[in-house]
Amino acid sequence: MATYVLVHGGGHGGWCYQSVARLLRAAGHEVYTPTLTGLGERAHLVSPQVDLDMHITDVVNVLHYEDLRDVILVGHSYGGMVMTGVADRATDRIGHMVYLDAATPENGQSLEDVAGLYMELARADGQVIDGVELVLFPGKDPMNYFGITDPAQIEWMKPKLTPHPYRCFEQKLVLENEAAVRALPETHIVCTNTMETRDLDALREASQGRLWDVDTGHDLMISEPEAVAELLLRVA
């Protein structure tokens, strides 16, 4: 039995992995889908203090308090920033890293550095509410609901999306144990819709050839949960 910890991306929550988690559990595996502070069902906790560092702590605490070891840590989109920080702080608890159409930051980079154009578009449509700069408001997403085109799926996800504190996207990732993080085995799963924005040769080298693609948009865990679950089972 494998243990998966699935980290969501910007504006989402653990809810986005419902279908994938169901399939993994049906195959006999243990699955955790934490929601990051200020998002999803934890949107009431949004504050000026919510940043990348807090989100890294959210997931590290799940590993610690649930006493999880040899975890397959999965991160989608902005979740790639979070999971890389988690691996730095809890390297001994991670067995495999899976970047799910995710940011792949280097030490000292922010999501602004990794995905500058998307961040510019998101920030241009943001608002400051109660002292918090928020972006990715539902219905104003520059990626058109994160690549989801099926009307039924859009209607399912639309009321669950929440605006995201921009501070998370501009904070630099600090890795204290970068060599140990890079030594962890990793797999990259990318979407055909975003492949042209990625250095596939670099991803293939970092993952020792474990680079797979799914023919869909960015929110592949919603649009193609069976394909995502099948690839995650292959990792296990």
Image: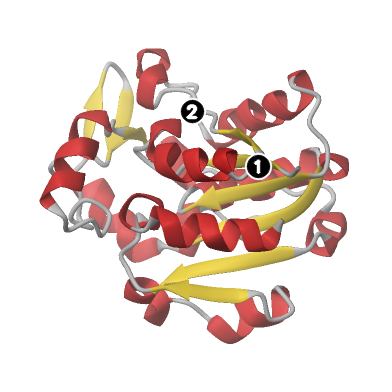
At label 1, the amino acid type is: Tyr
Whole-angstrom CA distance, mark 1 to mark 2, is 14 Å
Residue at image coords 74%, 79%: 208
Residue at image coords 78%, 24%: 64
Q: Secondary structure at mark 1?
A: strand
On the picture, is 171 further left or further right than 70? left
Residue at image coords 20%, 37%: 156
The mark found on residue 4 in the picture is 1
Quarter that holds the C terminus: bottom right
- Residue behind mark 2: 35
Any part of residue 104 in sight: no
Count numbered badges in the picture: 2
Q: Nearer the viewer, residue 1 or 14?
A: 1
On the picture, is 182 further left or further right than 157? right
Q: Residue furthest bottom?
A: 201
Other residues around mark 1 within 10 Å, as few (<14) / some (14–19) / many (≥20): many
Q: Secondary structure at mark 2?
A: loop
Q: Nearer the viewer, residue 45 or 206?
A: 206
Q: Could you say which quadrant of the image residue 47 lies in?
A: top left
Position of 60 relative to 216 (above/below): above
Q: Residue furthest top?
A: 44
Q: Position of residue 85 (x, y in %)?
A: 68, 44
At label 2, the amino acid type is: Thr
Position of 129 relative to 158 (above/below): above
Q: Position of residue 8 (x, y in %)?
A: 47, 41
Ranked by sequence position, the earlier of labels 1 and 2 is: 1
Q: Position of residue 7 (x, y in %)?
A: 54, 41
On the picture, is 115 further left or further right than 74? left
Q: Could you say which quadrant of the image residue 9 lies in?
A: top left
From the viewer's perspective, is the residue at label 1 or at label 2 nearer?
Answer: 1
Residue at image coords 81%, 38%: 90
Quarter that holds the N terminus: top right
